[in-house]
Image (cartoon, helix red, strand yellow):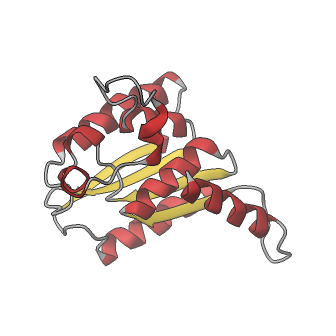
Amino acid sequence: DRHLLDHQRALDVMEKLDFISGDSFGAIGNSLGGRGVMYLSAFDERVATAVSSTGISPHFNNIVRHRTGQSSPLLKLSDPAEPVRRVPWDYHELIALCAPRALLALESHVDNCNPNCWPGMQCFYHASEVYKLLGHPERLTMVTHGDGHDTPPDLREFAYTWLDRFLK
């Protein structure tokens, strides 16, 4: 995915800057950016902690993607000659790949882009089993709110505190 590659190159550049210390990073993003930080956390071990705001939206129920025909390029991993009988992967697997790195999900239960929050909560719950197996259930947290497809200021402050907690 192009976004993942771009984010990894940004980490490469940041590692070389004199005023940046340490070899672990935190990432935060909203919506597509929230999905991006989950990919980055899943596939780049330099990311110690990530905050995804309104970024969990399972493929099978995201009405915006169905309505607009948008989907993740990573969904196209199956053979194009074969009929698609099921989505080859979904968000519980992406979240599980982030383990044991810390991940905070800020999800709205009144999101016009993803109005059915229950499948996202189920994905999160299933992925939490991997964190438990690895002995770090405290590194995975979900907070739900009613402020739509955005991150309200008080939750943004909570997210910054979360990042600090796992970066220190």
Q: Residue furthest front?
A: 81
Q: Is residue 137 visible?
A: no
Q: Position of residue 26 (x, y in %)?
A: 59, 60
Camera-side residue of 29 and 168: 29
Which residue is at 49% across, 50% downward?
38
Relative to 111, does residue 135 appear above or below in the rendering?
above
- In-image side of 134 versus 94 (left or right): right
Camera-side residue of 123 and 132: 123
Which residue is at 32% across, 54% downward?
70
Q: Is residue 122 visible?
A: yes
Q: Position of residue 165 (x, y in %)?
A: 55, 57
Camera-side residue of 36 and 72: 72
In which quadrant of the rendered image does the C terminus lie?
bottom right
Residue 24, by quadrant, is bottom right
Residue 152, by quadrant, is bottom left
Q: Position of residue 20 (x, y in %)?
A: 78, 71
- In-image side of 24 versus 55 (left or right): right
- In-image side of 127 versus 12 (left or right): left
- In-image side of 167 versus 159 (left or right): right
For the image, the number of numbered tags is 0
Which residue is at 22% across, 48% downward?
62
Which residue is at 84% across, 68% downward?
16
Q: Position of residue 129 (x, y in %)?
A: 40, 26
